Each structure stands twice: as C-alpha cells, then as structure tokens.
Amino acid sequence: MDTKGLLTLMGDSSDIADDALVLGGRAFTSRFILGSGKYSLALIRAAVEHAGAQIITLALRRANPGGDENILDYIPEGVTLLPNTSGARTAEEAVKIAHFARELGCGDMIKIEVIRDAKYLLPDNHETLKAAEILADEGFIVMPYINPDLTVARDLAGVGAACVMPLAAPIGSNRGIEARGLIRILIEETELPVIVDAGIGRPSQACDVMEMGAAAVMINTAVATAGDVPAMAGAFKKAVEAGRAAFLAGPGRVLEDGADASSPLTGFLRGEGRL
C-alpha cells in the first residue's frame, strides 16, 4: 500500500498534502530517498521503481555525458536528482563539485559530503558547515551529511540548510541505528527535517527511525547488497510508510512496570460473571 493508502486508512486523505516532505520549497510524498552509488546500472531502474523513490542521489563520477554508460539513462523520468559531493575533502572541493553538478543540468539540490577520514568515512562537520553556508547563499537547496551533533545542526539551520542528514552508523556498514540517542535529540530539538542517512541495514530499522519522527531515510548499501535488490527496495518502501503512519498515529504508552490486561477478565475468573 502506498503512502496515500496508509493515510486514508488513518483519516481524511486531505492529510496527505499536509504531510508532504518539503525541501527547499519542493514537496515530495515519498520519504524514501534512494542512493545509487553501489548498483550495477542494470538494476537502478528496478530499484527506483520498487522503492517508489522520488529522489535519488547521484555521484557525478557516474554521470558521464557522451560516455558508453551514463547513469542518467537508467533513472526513470520524473525522479529528482540529488547530486552529492562525494570525494570532497574540503569545503572548497565540495563547492566546486556542486557548481559542476549545476552546470551538468542536475539542478540546485545538493547533498554535501565532506569526508577526510579514510578509515571510518566520518563526515567533517566543520568543513560541511562552511560549504553549506557558501552554497545556500548561492541559491542551492543544501542537504548536509553530518555526524549527529545538535550544535552543528542548529548552525546549519542558521546558514540556510534545507535539512540535516545525520548518519545512523558508519557509511556502508549496515550496522543499524548506533547513534540512536543523538538522532532522537536532533529530531526533538532541530527545526530542520532530519533525514537519517548511512548505516541503516534492515527495513525494520528504517521503520524504527521513522516512528521516532525522522522526516525521511536515505538508503543505499542495504538495498544494493541485498540478494534480491528490487524486492528489498520494495520492503524498505513499505517499512518507511509504516513507520511514518505509526508516528502520525501516535504510538501507545509504554508500561515500565507491571501489566495491563487488554481484555479484563478478573471478575469472571473469580466466579463473578457467567457466560
């Protein structure tokens, strides 16, 4: 069932428009952003279609105008491209890549990745903030990939970022939500949409962060390395929709001590009632 169907079950379908993911003034009904960095080109179209993704990331080294194989030829029409600054080690390099992406016709949305750490591939928050400020001033819709840090997230909001994209665990690890507590803080305390990026390895984990109130998730490795790529893309789609629907519905209370029978029968068991 798609997002519209889930929300219709919950109430008035007019809620759908109110629940759109808005980035830089653009509205999206899908909250599943698909990464494209690890797919064979033959599987990209199937993955996008099964995911129902409206945004797909794009590493510029895979866009090769005039070459034998161009990833752009495999992405369905109507899907918004989100080029990233993969490979940048400084803010200056990230800005140059963003300019190149715009010159190639990829639009003004840009995912900022600035990574100097070669072992764990952790983002450099300081350089990311610098790049975000420059590119936001130039009219880009800036989507920064960061270590989950509340101060940095607030600073990014201050310079005009459209969202923050904290990692859940090291990129490509599929280890799940190792930064759970920090991500929850960002969701609760940051005015920007929080899109959880990197580390999520299972659809259940995507559902979990969506239930927490994340605005969206970005998945690449977990789908690209699955045994059945299209089927896993579809599984993540359903998980993201279910998590969002649960968040909107408002999860029930949790009892830390004791229990509460769902169908009280204590009187009957004491012989006070009759069938």
Image (cartoon, grey):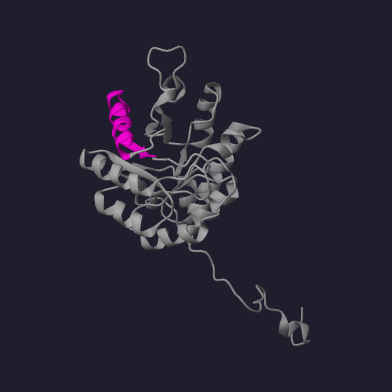
Would you say residue 233 is visible in this rendering?
A: no
Would you say residue 268 is visible in this rendering?
A: yes
Residue shown at 75%/88% (left/top)?
A: 272
The residue closer to the viewer here, 100 or 197, is 100
Rendering coords of residue 252 (x, y %): 54, 67
Rendering coords of residue 199 (x, y %): 54, 46
Is residue 224 highlighted in magenta?
Answer: no
Q: What segment is highlighted magenta in the picture?
A: 91-113
Residue shown at 50%/57% (left/top)?
A: 211
Q: Is residue 247 left or right of residue 92?
A: right
Q: In the picture, residue 214 is in which quadrant?
A: bottom left
Q: Is residue 70 above or below residue 146?
A: above
Query: Which quadrant holds the C terminus?
Result: bottom right
The residue closer to the viewer here, 116 or 159, is 116
The residue closer to the viewer here, 238 or 13, is 238
Rendering coords of residue 220 (x, y %): 52, 37
